[in-house]
Image (cartoon, rainbow, N blue to C red):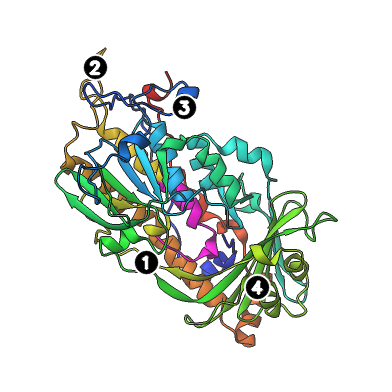
Amino acid sequence: MVVCSTHILQHVIHLRQPHGAPGSTSLQAFQHAKPGQKLSGCKRCRQRHLPRHMTCASSSTLSQKAHGNNSAAIAEQDMFLIAGAGIAGLAMAAALIKVGVPCKVLEREPGPRKGGSAIGLWPNAFRALDALGVADHLREQHPLISRVELCTADGGTLKAFSLNECQGAPHEFRGVKRATLLEALQSIVPESCIEYGAAIHSVETDQNGAIAVLETGKKVRARCLIGTDGAKSRVARAVNVPKPNYAGYAAYRGVATMPQGLPIPSDTVRQTWGAGVRAGMYPISDTELYWFTVFNAPEDASFVSSKDRQADALRFLPGWKGGIYEAVEHTDPDTITRSKLTDRWPPIGKGLSKGAVTLAGDALHPMTPNLGQGGCTALEDAVILARKVQSLLQPESHTKGARPTTLRSVATSDLVQVLRDYEKERKSRTRLITIRSNLMGQALQIPFAPVCAVRDFVVKNIYSPRHFLDHANYDCGRLTESQLATR
């Protein structure tokens, strides 16, 4: 994730992000097993003292095929399907598991995702990770970042400030390897909840829920399908959600290994701005540094081979000071990634999905990385949706001994209404973040030196960091763990 401070120009554009914390509700546990149903469960579920009938759909059940038909139809399952085992997908699975909703993750890759560089986790992300129960593990491994430096390409400092100068302090920010975050989330998702090599081809809906049609022809039925398969989501495409728009610029990202010492303080994010090019970096360990560089490029620009990416990234940084050039030099060229940056502004008053199908993460709200909020809001999505689904399963009576509602007994129409309420809430939360991030990026990618001079003057002499983290002053709330998940 590119973590840019371009939103420091928000006082010029006059965009302010409303923020607030949806209250978390203490919800009772529920029992979701079908009458008389006994699932085998997985070894990891048993190791965590979870009942054999809860948490994840048995992989053996999902592999059943109809007799005499290669395009097998799976028997209806009282579970949620999640498309994609990235950050958004594993966070969603972890949240649903925590509240006792059975789920299955379908991942198109043949195994766990290993690539990617790093991601910046701001306060709102750590509140979501606290709700999921994995935040402390990440805190132990990654340094706390507390300072920001905004610099020019020649090494000058425009502004330096502590995050505690921002409204809502104290604030928490840490850089985390994407692979490390995925491992943390997967640690609470049983192995049998994830089916690899399961690429979705199309999606169907009916009065009973949703059906994922895989590229193999197999059909998997569920009460709900959640597309967490990225900005190019096949689930989003299947329900006619418009594809994201190219922002006009691309980015290189990488993780430098510098055992002889980092070129920046261990508690600092450093942003460096040029004309039509900008870069940034922050530590993720004592010897590792995440970096990025963003540059203007036509949408149809060809990508260089992996072995040439380092040289191409350095081509945008001739003579740059402050350590960014050295960071790129100390990065394995094969691990450097290049991507086109896109977004889609959430429409006002218009749904983004249909039936028992919904979206999360970049599939729901793709945004440019200029505020570092793509992954952070994906983590929020998981907590918000899991809590809303759990609210469907509360006992209607508060008398002692009242039994919770089962997932099977929930009407599809009620579930669909919850999904639409979730989408409305998440669109409201992410709309201004997406727009502000886009406008900040456009402002800082202008390649004209006079504009850059005005920008630098404003930052150095006028800008106050008070509202630097307004968009991160958000609390997605807590999750009430299902009694079935803890007994």
Circle 3 residue: 43
Counting from the top left corner in percent of width and height, residue 467 is at 55, 58
Q: Say what secondary structure mark 4 lies in.
A: helix
Numbered marks: total: 4
- Closer to the N terminus: mark 1 or mark 2? 1
Left or right: 251, with 235 as reference point: right
Circle 2 residue: 402
Circle 4 residue: 309
Query: In this picture, is 289 found above or below 463?
Result: above
Can residue 477 be seen here? no
Q: Seen from this angle, which residue lies furthest top?
A: 400
Would you call the spot at circle 1 few (<14 residues within 10 Å), some (14-19), or many (20 or more)? some
Identified by mark 2, the residue type is Ala
Can residue 273 be seen here? yes
Identified by mark 1, the residue type is Trp
Asked if the stretch drawn in magenta spans residue 304, the answer is no
Which dot, 2 or 3, sits closer to the camera? Answer: 3
Would you call the spot at circle 3 few (<14 residues within 10 Å), some (14-19), or many (20 or more)? some
- Residue drawn at x 59%, y 64% is 4
Of the 4 image quadrants, the one containing the N terminus is bottom right
- Closer to the N terminus: mark 3 or mark 4? 3
**Distance Cα–Cα, label 4 vs label 1:** 30 Å
Query: In this picture, is 65 found above or below 309?
Result: above
Circle 1 residue: 345
User: Residue 223's quadrant in the figure?
Assistant: top left
Which dot, 4 or 1, sits closer to the camera? Answer: 4
**Distance Cα–Cα, label 2 vs label 3:** 31 Å
Q: Which residues are magenta?
A: 365-381
